[in-house]
């Protein structure tokens, strides 16, 4: 078992194993997503306050959760790469950045579209929206810094530091609705007592959340494989791989 | 629910379907981009291999 | 500088930077002039209605201070990087974070403190009340050191890059936003006559956090940039 993890850290084995996992994870992800969409769009009843427009929630909330989750993974992988000089940790960290930025963008846009009929405005500078926007800038900063540094090992270590400095934003986003009077809705799922949401709405929400996590896993593996090819392009195994194709 | 009711979403059809549409675009883009990148990388590396082998 | 004691190295480095800055006093004027000019542009651009200026004044002055701080950041490590002293700091026996702290404090004294001195003048230009001006000075006193410290992290990450100006802004501005929000909010609240102890506590907390952690992050970033 330990040998498995040790092997996993090697880019060559990771490339091969990820290639095997990706199709399976993709299939499972599609299953969750289709079930979640079916439940969310067809089975869940309309909300007594918001009517049918609340269905945007099934995209908006999982996207927002993912925006924070991916950042924490990116910072964590970056820290592992910094401390133990693990190439694969560095690769996973930088591969996660564009995916996290996409989810943040999606959360902001769907939130804005949802806000227009509900609050009457496309945007408001309250604590949660502002800190989520800052999160997008943090992601873009990581990507920009990585592209600006030529030596990719140095680039990975620099972006790890940047990601770690920015991780303080995550609790701010999460607790912003409790610390400030905001227009945004308060916590309904991640409270410690029973969630105050109808079970028929909770199920598709959780299904979509799992689907998005699996989606992230699939895409990060795909991107990491590309980054591995790029970084290891001068090694024997990559030469053999590309020589055959 | 009829199809027209489904598309109308109680009057909020524009908002709901635009959101789901943008989500679809974002998800598809995230899948397609690494696929294209990998294909390009393999092609570039293969070209480089051929040039290196020719030199030998 | 071969010296056994780290605290002596700290004071020597601090005095060196201050002396160098003093010998090029004209360079110190630049961020200050920028600060004043940017602030002065706003009444010209948005109209000189005193009520309007009073309500947006604190925000304008703080954004101008933020931009001036950002423009002056490059000077923290630039000259040392160019002549090789930065590598000497890395190689020295003293902890890099202490040396970094000395440089950052020097930077704040040279670029941040003058902003504090000029701010009341700008407050008068924008028709701010006495309470607002006092709070402005207080928030600048607490906030500009944070700008120097957090900015130093950004500079350390980008010091080895060519054309690091734009990317430095992209990295550093998101980290500056909490300071801006709390400080501008404090001045607005003080203008309305309400207590600002909460805001000041938050700003002080940010300052404490920056002073204790940012030298470590900056030192780590320098080691990576110069590797």
Image: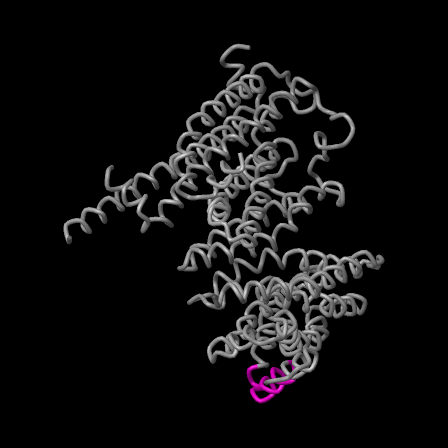
Residue A81 forms part of the magenta stretch: no
Q: Nearer the viewer, residue C141 or A210?
A: A210
The image position of residue A93, as x and y in percent, is 51, 46
Classify residue A51 as left or right of residue B13. Answer: right
Q: Quadrant of the N terminus of chain B?
A: top right
Q: Nearer the viewer, residue C104 or C225?
A: C225
The image position of residue A47, as x and y in percent, is 67, 21
The image position of residue C206, as x and y in percent, is 72, 60
Q: Nearer the viewer, residue A20 or A110?
A: A20
The image position of residue B46, as x and y in percent, is 24, 44
Residue under the point 40% across and 59% down: A150
Q: Nearer the viewer, residue B9 or C178?
A: C178
Query: Which secondary structure class fits the magenta region best?
Result: helix
Residue under the point 60% across and 21% down: A204
Image-quadrant location for residue A243: top left
- Examine the rendered structure and indicate whether residue A67 appears above or below residue A84: above
- Examine the rendered structure and indicate whether residue A18 appears above or below residue A239: above
- Examine the rendered structure and indicate whether residue A54 appears above or below residue C182: above
Classify residue C29 as left or right of residue B35. Answer: right
Please state the extent of the stretch shown in magenta in the rendering: C14-27
Give the total number of marks visible in the rendering. Answer: 0
Residue under the point 38% across and 42% down: A226
């Amino acid at each position: 078992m330990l040998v498995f993890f040790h092997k996993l850290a090697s880019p060559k084995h990771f490339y091969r194993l990820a290639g095997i996992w990706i199709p399976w994870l993709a299939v499972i992800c599609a299953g969750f997503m289709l079930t979640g969409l079916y439940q969310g769009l067809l089975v869940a009843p309309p909300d007594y306050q918001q009517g049918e427009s609340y269905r945007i929630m099934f995209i908006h909330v999982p996207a927002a959760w993912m925006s924070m989750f991916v950042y924490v993974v990116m910072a964590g992988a970056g820290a592992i790469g910094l401390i133990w000089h693990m190439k694969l940790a560095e690769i996973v960290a930088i591969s996660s950045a564009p995916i996290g930025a996409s989810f943040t963008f999606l959360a902001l846009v769907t939130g804005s579209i949802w806000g227009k009929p509900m609050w009457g405005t496309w945007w408001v500078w309250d604590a949660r929206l502002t800190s989520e926007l800052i999160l997008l800038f943090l992601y873009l900063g990581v990507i920009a810094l990585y592209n600006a540094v030529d030596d990719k090992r140095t680039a990975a270590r620099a972006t790890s530091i940047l990601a770690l400095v920015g991780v303080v934003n995550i609790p701010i986003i999460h607790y912003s609705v409790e610390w400030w009077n905001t227009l945004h809705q308060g916590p309904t799922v991640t409270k410690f007592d029973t969630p105050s949401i109808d079970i028929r709405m909770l199920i598709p929400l959780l299904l979509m959340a799992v689907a998005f996590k699996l989606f992230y896993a699939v895409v990060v593996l795909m991107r990491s494989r590309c980054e591995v090819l790029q970084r290891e392009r001068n090694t024997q195994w990559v030469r053999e791989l590309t020589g055959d194709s | 629910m009829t199809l027209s009711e489904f598309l109308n979403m109680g009057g909020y059809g524009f908002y709901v379907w635009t959101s789901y549409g943008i989500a679809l675009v974002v998800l598809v883009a995230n899948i397609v981009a690494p696929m294209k990148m990998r294909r390009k990388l393999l092609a570039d590396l293969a070209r480089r291999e051929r040039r290196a082998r020719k030199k030998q | 500088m071969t010296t056994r004691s780290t605290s002596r190295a700290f004071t020597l480095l601090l005095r060196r930077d201050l002396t160098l800055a003093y010998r090029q006093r004209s360079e110190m004027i630049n961020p200050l002039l920028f600060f004043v000019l940017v602030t002065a542009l706003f009444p010209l651009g948005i109209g000189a209605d005193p009520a309007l200026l009073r309500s947006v004044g604190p925000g304008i002055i703080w954004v101008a201070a933020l931009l001036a701080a950002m423009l002056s950041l490059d000077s923290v490590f630039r000259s040392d990087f160019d002549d090789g002293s930065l590598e000497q700091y890395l190689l020295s026996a003293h902890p890099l974070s202490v040396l970094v702290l000395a440089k950052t404090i020097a930077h704040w004294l040279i670029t941040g403190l003058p902003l504090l001195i000029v701010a009341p003048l700008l407050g008068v230009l924008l028709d701010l009340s006495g309470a607002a001006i006092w709070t402005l000075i207080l928030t600048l006193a607490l906030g500009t050191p944070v700008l120097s410290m957090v900015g130093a992290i950004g500079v350390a990450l980008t010091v080895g890059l060519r054309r690091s100006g734009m990317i430095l802004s992209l990295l550093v501005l998101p980290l500056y936003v909490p300071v801006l929000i709390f400080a501008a909010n404090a001045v607005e609240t003080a203008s309305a006559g309400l207590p600002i102890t909460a805001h000041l506590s938050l700003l002080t907390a940010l300052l404490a956090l920056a002073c204790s952690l940012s030298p470590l992050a900056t030192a780590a970033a320098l080691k990576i940039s110069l590797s």
